[in-house]
Image (spheres, helix red, strand yellow):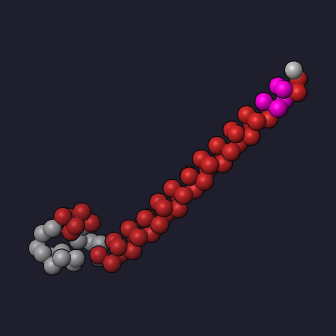
Amino acid sequence: MCQFCDKKTCEMAQFIGPQVHISEYVRVEDKWRKMRATRKKREEEEANVRDEIDYYQKAVREYVDKKDS
């Protein structure tokens, strides 16, 4: 019997198995979604920082090249 939809068989019950209560599954899935969102945000911030570093490195190289010429 599925804890979520009260059917004898359903995909959710087959996926999580009879040993896991639906509330535990929902709690862990929510935690996983928050961790995934945090990781995605951190990766975007890291990409922005890398872009800024590349921009400033290029600007410094151009300045040094002009100064040397």
- Residue 43 vs residue 14, the one in the foreground: 43
Quadrant of the rendered structure where residue 18 is?
Answer: bottom left
Query: Which residues, given as a range, are shown in magenta?
Result: 61-66
Image location of residue 24, percent across then percent down:
35, 75
Residue at left offset 27%, top offset 72%: 19
Q: Outermost residue, right direction?
A: 68
> The C terminus appears in which quarter of the rendering?
top right
- Residue 67 vs residue 42, the one in the foreground: 67
- Residue 49 vs residue 7, the one in the foreground: 49
Residue at left offset 74%, top offset 40%: 56
In the depicted structure, whether residue 58 falls above or below residue 51? above
Quadrant of the rendered structure where residue 67 is?
Answer: top right
Q: In this rendering, would 54 be left or right of 68?
A: left
In the depicted structure, whether residue 61 falls above or below residue 29? above
Image location of residue 52, percent across then percent down:
68, 45
Residue at left offset 84%, top offset 29%: 64
Q: Outermost residue, top direction?
A: 69
Q: Could you tell me what secondary structure mostly forms the magenta stretch?
A: helix
Q: In this rendering, would 38 be left or right of 23?
A: right
Q: In this rendering, would 42 be left or right of 36?
A: right
> The N terminus appears in which quarter of the rendering?
bottom left
In the rendered structure, does residue 65 fall within the stretch colored magenta? Answer: yes
Image location of residue 4, percent across then percent down:
22, 76
- Residue 34 vs residue 8, the one in the foreground: 34
Residue at left offset 59%, top offset 47%: 47
